[in-house]
Image: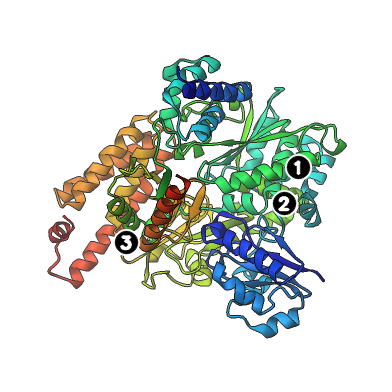
């Protein structure tokens, strides 16, 4: 068995000196005259272990991590690239983690969309096919357009970008338009803080997204696709472009795909640092080369979208799930999850945690269980205090809310959102009034400016929260803030202004409770003194 | 026009010629121009406007909408610090104030030696390993104040070597 070593090439690994680790491995292999194949895979999503270096053995892959460039020498001294598992486990290098698949963080997951992540070389077509890639496409080729849409509808798949709109209905709407030119647009403008699932998928298994987009094209009758990728993801851009070029070279993209008489062309387009372009109509404006101003709906993009043509806009994870659903069947997918939330969601554990990373699970587990099972407490070793779920437009949740099941309806019922599955943990040092103020500030910074409640409301909101924090007319200003939030919720054109009040109101509520507790335990600290300390 | 600006204008025309027939070509053109010059020089805007059959004001309107596009030349290195919540939860705010203090500049400003331009960024998608910064196309995780100082020092040394 030949010696094979895997070092990921995803953003997280590279952000922690992963490139130097790979370079040192190549150098040391050459120096010790070892014939080693170095494969640059994607991340497994266990970010606290990156750079995670894996070695192929006769019993499966074993892992070492987190590996620094300085550790490479001792790994070679321990003959870590030896393909005999018995020899590997006998060595007991301090970074040795055993068989990768047996690491509990991975083993406890239900990976459907991320089944190949970290396993394959992300841009290698043969590797992709060897791991059941393009199986969904082959199935789709045997169905007619309506047959594909029916399969997606039956799976119960809902948009994974955050809005959770049923994908089947969106596709059916576009399919029903008797128009020649239609488009598939992938929303890869993953701007929510605390989320990285799209990035991980694009860097670890980009061909799954490509496959999902081709299937979407077949389903609605579109022959052109665009991936709108945020400019903050330079590594994803590199990997996506390589994967797409390889797919063209093997005729999985282009004219007459694999002799099917069907065509699909695909291009990555780069955003330019505007959070609002994650909103689908703003994204379409941006793709057309304009300022990313939100459009009024109707018309729905599925009827009049990009360049006025019927357009399916789907999130990266929705399109990736499509490939899986076609390959393994709608029923299997719908068997995961609870209630109207079918399938799995890749949760992203981020912020102040010991073990951050991607955890793909069926909907329905509670936030508390998820964190107990995976996060292992905060990185700062202080108690967890509040958790922002669903990105910068999601509510801050306090401990009594952590037993809520992670599904769309249960979260909506407590005035929170699941969004794109991002979970940001804060410890008890968090100043929630400061977080509330930041939410308004972020809205002011990122508002497209088209509607007044969002454009002006966010600026006024920042000012009112400052006054509250400074102890000026606290009771009156709290009423004013509530009133402002209601206006933004009811009157904004899109979710930017309409949902900013979620983190603001939840944080202010928790902040007041925090003050009250402090007031009781430390009677000398009144609200006014608290504010004075701050000033 | 001097030789440098003739070359710059030829380069811009070549970029325009290569991309202008794409549907929605404006953003790809702006990206390519910025990639070439490090920013979007004022004299390229009328050329782009001509090719897009729009006014220079319209092109400027698009440029100014997007944080990523710049119309002034930055320092030798653009350093972006993530301001978003996941990094805040891991000490991002402390890193922000340390960076501003140690470089003695605010966001959107350049150090007096023109080596570093400091910009805010909202999420680099590395949210389990913050605080994060981006230097050029490189994203760096778990940046403590000390690590930030080392990175800045390396950037200063690297510039001297190039000169």
Quadrant placement of the N terminus of chain B: top left
User: x, y percentage for residue A509?
Assistant: 29, 56
Q: Earlier in the sequence, mark 2 or mark 1?
A: 1
Around disc 1, counting alpha carbons within 10 Å, would you say few (fewer than 14), some (14 to 19), or many (20 or more)?
many
Q: Earlier in the sequence, mark 1 or mark 3?
A: 1
User: x, y percentage for residue B45?
Assistant: 46, 21
* Quadrant of the rendered image containing residue A39: bottom right
The chain holding disc 2 is A
Position of B74 compared to B102: left or right? right
**Is A86 drawn above or below residue A227 in the view shown?**
below
Q: Nearer the viewer, residue A438 or A38?
A: A38
The residue positioned 63% from the left and 62% from the top of the image is A22
Q: Secondary structure at mark 2?
A: helix
Q: Earlier in the sequence, mark 2 or mark 3?
A: 2
Visible in this render: residue A451? Answer: yes
Between disc 1 and disc 3, the foreground one is: 1
Q: Nearer the viewer, residue A14 or A153?
A: A14
Visible in this render: residue A252? Answer: no
User: x, y percentage for residue A389?
Assistant: 45, 55
The residue positioned 77% from the left and 67% from the top of the image is A35
Q: Are marks 2 and 1 in contact (CB under 8 Å)?
A: no
* Quadrant of the rendered image containing residue A83: bottom right
Q: Name the residue that disc number 3 marks.
A: A430
Quadrant placement of the C terminus of chain B: top left
Q: CA distance from mark 2 to mark 3?
A: 40 Å
Q: Name the residue that disc number 2 marks.
A: A324
Q: CA distance from mark 1 to mark 3?
A: 47 Å
Q: Secondary structure at mark 3?
A: loop
The chain holding disc 3 is A
Marker disc for residue A247: 1
**Is A153 drawn above or below residue A491 in the view shown?**
below
Q: Nearer the viewer, residue A430 or A206?
A: A206
């Amino acid at each position: 068995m030949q010696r094979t070593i895997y070092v990921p090439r995803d953003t997280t690994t590279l952000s922690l000196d992963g490139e130097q680790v790979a370079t040192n491995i190549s150098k040391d292999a050459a120096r010790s005259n070892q014939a080693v194949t170095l494969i640059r895979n994607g991340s497994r999503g266990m970010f606290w272990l990156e750079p995670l270096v894996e070695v192929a053995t006769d019993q499966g892959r074993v892992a070492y991590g987190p590996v620094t460039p300085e550790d490479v020498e001792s790994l070679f001294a321990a003959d870590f690239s030896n393909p005999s598992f018995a020899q590997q486990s006998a060595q007991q290098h301090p970074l040795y983690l055993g068989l990768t698949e047996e690491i509990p963080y991975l083993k406890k997951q239900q990976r459907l969309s991320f089944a190949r992540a970290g396993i394959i070389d992300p841009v290698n077509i043969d590797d992709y096919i060897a791991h059941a890639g393009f199986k969904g496409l082959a199935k789709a080729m045997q169905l007619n357009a309506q047959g594909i849409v029916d399969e997606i509808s039956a799976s119960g798949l809902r948009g994974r970008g955050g809005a959770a709109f049923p994908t089947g209905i969106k596709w059916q709407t576009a399919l029903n338009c008797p128009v020649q030119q239609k488009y598939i647009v992938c929303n890869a403008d993953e701007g929510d803080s605390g989320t990285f699932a799209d990035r991980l998928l694009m860097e670890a298994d980009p061909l799954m997204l490509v496959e999902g987009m081709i299937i979407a094209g077949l389903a609605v009758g579109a022959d052109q696709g665009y991936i709108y990728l945020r400019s903050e993801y330079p590594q994803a851009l590199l990997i996506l472009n390589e994967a797409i070029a390889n797919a063209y070279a093997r005729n999985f993209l282009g004219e007459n795909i694999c002799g099917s008489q069907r065509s699909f062309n695909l291009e990555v387009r780069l955003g330019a640092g505007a959070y609002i372009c994650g909103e689908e109509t703003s994204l379409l404006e941006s793709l057309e080369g304009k300022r990313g101003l939100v459009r009024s709906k109707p018309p729905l993009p599925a009827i009049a979208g990009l360049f006025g043509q019927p357009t399916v806009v789907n999130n990266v994870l929705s399109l990736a799930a499509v490939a899986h659903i076609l390959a393994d069947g709608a029923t299997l997918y719908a068997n995961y999850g609870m209630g109207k939330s079918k399938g799995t969601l890749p949760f992203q554990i981020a912020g102040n945690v010991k073990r951050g990373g991607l955890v793909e699970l069926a909907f329905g587990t509670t936030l508390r269980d998820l964190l107990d099972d995976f996060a292992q407490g905060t990185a700062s070793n202080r108690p967890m205090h509040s958790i922002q779920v669903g990105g910068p437009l999601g509510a801050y949740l306090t401990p009594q809310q952590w037993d809520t099941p992670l599904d769309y309806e249960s979260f909506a019922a407590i005035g929170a959102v699941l969004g794109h599955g991002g979970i940001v943990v804060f410890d008890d040092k968090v100043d929630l009034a400061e977080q509330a103020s930041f939410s308004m500030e972020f809205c002011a910074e990122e508002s497209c400016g088209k509607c007044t409640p969002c454009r002006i409301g966010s600026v006024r909101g920042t000012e009112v929260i400052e006054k509250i924090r400074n102890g000026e007319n606290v009771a009156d200003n709290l009423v004013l803030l509530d009133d402002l939030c209601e206006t933004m919720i009811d009157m904004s054109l899109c979710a930017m202004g309409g949902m900013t009040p979620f983190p603001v109101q939840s944080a202010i509520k928790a902040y007041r409770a925090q003050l009250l507790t402090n007031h009781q335990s430390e009677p000398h600290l009144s609200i006014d003194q608290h504010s004075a300390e701050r000033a | 026009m001097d030789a440098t600006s003739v070359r710059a204008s030829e380069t811009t025309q070549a970029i325009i010629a290569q991309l202008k027939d794409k549907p929605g070509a404006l953003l790809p053109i702006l990206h390519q121009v910025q990639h070439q010059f490090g920013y979007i020089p004022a004299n390229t805007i009328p050329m782009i406007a001509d090719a897009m059959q729009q006014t220079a004001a319209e092109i400027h309107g698009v440029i100014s909408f997007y944080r990523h596009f710049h119309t002034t030349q930055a320092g030798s290195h653009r350093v972006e610090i993530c301001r978003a919540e996941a990094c805040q939860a891991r000490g991002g705010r402390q890193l922000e104030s340390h960076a501003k203090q140690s470089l003695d500049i605010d966001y959107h400003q350049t150090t007096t030696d023109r080596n570093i331009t400091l910009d805010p960024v909202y999420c680099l998608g590395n949210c389990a390993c913050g605080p994060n910064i981006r230097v050029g196309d490189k994203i760096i995780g778990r940046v403590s104040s000390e690590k930030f100082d080392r990175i800045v020092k390396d950037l200063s040394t690297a510039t001297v070597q190039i000169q």
